[in-house]
């Protein structure tokens, strides 16, 4: 059975569940797995990397490579 068929079968079975506790547990399991999957891609930053980011931010600010909050909000409005 391929993954698409398995998903469809799972959805059909899920739609027939009337036990709210079971639905809550399934939701918790899905959310927990989603978080674990996301966290597996995270890599802690070293202190050296952290300080380099701070130095770059300071340099950007000193060289005028920044925009105001208001300007950013206006740019974001055009993204839609």
Image: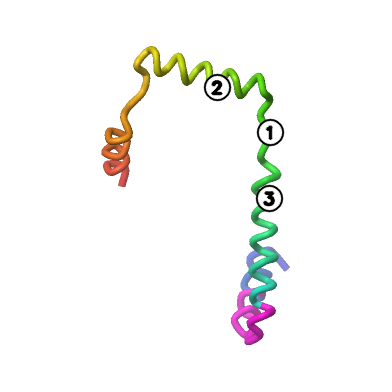
> Quick check: 29 left or right of 77?
right
Q: Secondary structure at mark 1?
A: loop
Q: At 58% from the left edge and 18% from the top edge, which residue is drawn?
A: 52
Vertical placement of residue 39 versus 49, above or below: below
User: From where the camera sits, is residue 73 visible?
Assistant: yes
Mark toward the start of the polypeptide (3 vs 1): 3
Foreground: disc 3 or disc 1: 1
Vertical placement of residue 34 versus 46, above or below: below
Badge 2 is on which residue? 53
Badge 1 is on which residue? 44
Q: Secondary structure at mark 2?
A: helix
> Quick check: 70 left or right of 5?
left
CA gap, disc 3 and disc 1: 15 Å
CA gap, disc 2 and disc 1: 14 Å
Q: Secondary structure at mark 3?
A: helix
| Part of the protein shown in magenta | 10-22
Q: At 37% from the left edge and 12% from the top edge, which residue is drawn?
A: 63
Badge 3 is on which residue? 37
Chosen colour scheme: rainbow
Q: At 60% from the left edge and 20% from the top edge, which residue is drawn?
A: 51
Q: Quadrant of residue 6?
A: bottom right
Q: Quadrant of residue 31?
A: bottom right
């Amino acid at each position: 059975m391929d993954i698409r068929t398995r998903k469809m079968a799972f959805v059909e079975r899920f739609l027939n569940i009337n036990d709210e506790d079971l639905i809550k547990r399934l939701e918790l399991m899905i959310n927990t797995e989603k978080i674990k999957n996301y966290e597996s891609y995270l890599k802690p930053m070293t202190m050296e990397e952290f300080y380099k980011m701070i130095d770059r931010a300071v340099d950007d600010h000193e060289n005028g490579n920044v925009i105001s909050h208001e300007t950013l909000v206006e740019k974001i409005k055009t993204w839609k």
